[in-house]
Amino acid sequence: MKLGFKKLLLSGAVLGLAAVTLAGCGSLTGDSKKASNDKSKDGSDTLLMYRVGDKPTNYDEIMEVVNKRMKEEIGVELNMQFIGWGDYEKKMSVITSSGENYDIAFANNYVNTAQKGAYKDITELAPKYAKETYENLDPTYIEGNKVNGKLYSIPVNANVFAQRVITFDKELVDKYKMDITKVKTLDDLAPLLKTIKENEQNVVPFAAGKDIRMGNFDYVYDVNVPLGIDLDGDEKTIVNPYETSDRMKNELKAMHNLYSQKFIPQDAATSDEIYRLDDKTWFARVETQGPFDYGDTILTRAAGRELVSVPLTDPLKDNGQMFVANWVISNTSKNAEKALEAINLINTDKDILTTMVFGLEGEAWEKVGDDKMKILDGYDASKKVIGGAWMSGDNKTLYTDEAITDDMIKERDEKIAAAKTSPLLGFNFNGDSVKTEVTNITNVTAQYRSGLSTGTLDPEKAIPEFNAKLKEAGLEKVQQEMQKQFDEFNSKKK
């Protein structure tokens, strides 16, 4: 699940760094009692880990459980240090560029950092020292995380595919007897949103934010460099969707129509307003769901009220999903094998992983039978967990919420098997020769993308202007270089 605009359940947490002094890293929080990579008093190793997010308020209690198990099973303890979401990219860049000695980290700019040699090549090590985790991964994760044929990360086995959906407040759907099964496109939304606007004065009909994505498109870089594969078109040709994709153009027109009728907040393109899932301030929104969201189950739990969704796109395994959450070993680590064993234990031990994701057993959750659990009133995703399931470890290892039935698990696995794989999966573009053009393109895109995606700008006028400026910025040069490398990538496929 990717919650719109800001993740409601990103209960922070970064497998962190030891209590060392680093330039620009004064906000690190974690276990100040353990020195970086030092031996503990009884001789066992302490592994230094960086994790993005906020240190949980009950950190000591959680780590007592985690480290007791770690010590018993593999003879090491974890020293977690936490770096906030807003600081993580900058501070991890300082840490890696300075050659600081650490063991494990939540990957930052995975492909680029791996290409720079900051991460340990674990192509041969992972199958040996993280054997169970490696074997349990969907093969797509392994292929998608290879950089120049080498594996540098242990990805979190979670939402291996993504599907864009429109999510509704079921209470309002029922109140006005709406049939959302008829909603197949954004154009189909208008009558429903009109009803809400006329009858629910304190509810935003369509909570579209500036980061909303349009089209059915997989980007080589990201949405800020509009080049990639049109999943409704030729899957071997790199194109600009604002120029060639009829679906993109139609969705942008539909968004402008909704915006013009004031179904969308009029400051959507610039506002940092967060429409939380658990606030009854909105009726519909675009969400991204994956197999471990079990349809609307996880969204509903996060919202504290029933939500229902209809699909806009088919499930897709793409690079974006591959890089959501990767755990890497520093090339400076002197404990690479033990670090992989620790990652493996987190991914395979139900009690460790569930404690990290949900908090203390007996306070936040309790076991129901051998494999399931019940969430208790003490569960607090914002303060009392190490991190969300999506970023912590193999989601199949967690004790399953008692609300998840065997039929739902079977459907999950069937959807994973049936999901389409993006043609770009595993393609890592080397942009060294077009750095200036990429920067220029990013700057141009910043002027138009949010305005177009939220419907604020009229696509009939804005798209031609946008494309002209992209051309001036060097889009064609980047496109040609991408196509050349993509053709080479395809020629090497078995």
Image (cartoon, grey):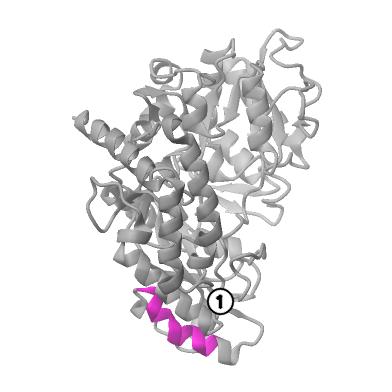
Residue 187, given in percent of the width and then of the height, sits at: 39, 79
Residue 456, given in percent of the width and then of the height, sits at: 54, 72
Q: 352 and 147: which one is in front?
A: 147
- Other residues around mark 1 within 10 Å, as few (<14) / some (14–19) / many (≥20): many
Q: Mark 1 belongs to which amino acid? A: Ile
Residue 158, given in percent of the width and then of the height, sits at: 45, 43
Q: Tell whether 135 sits left or right of 52.
A: left
Please name the residue shown 77% across and 29% down the image: 24
The residue segment tinted magenta is: 185-196
Please name the residue shown 76% across and 32% down the image: 28
- In the figure, 353 relative to 149: above or below? below
Q: In the structure shown, which secondary structural element does the residue marked by tag 1 occupy?
A: loop
Q: Tell whether 221 sits left or right of 447.
A: left
Residue 4, given in percent of the width and then of the height, sits at: 55, 60
Q: Tell whether 279 sits left or right of 114.
A: right
Name the residue that disc number 1 marks: 264
State whether the magenta stretch is mostly helix, strand or loop.
helix
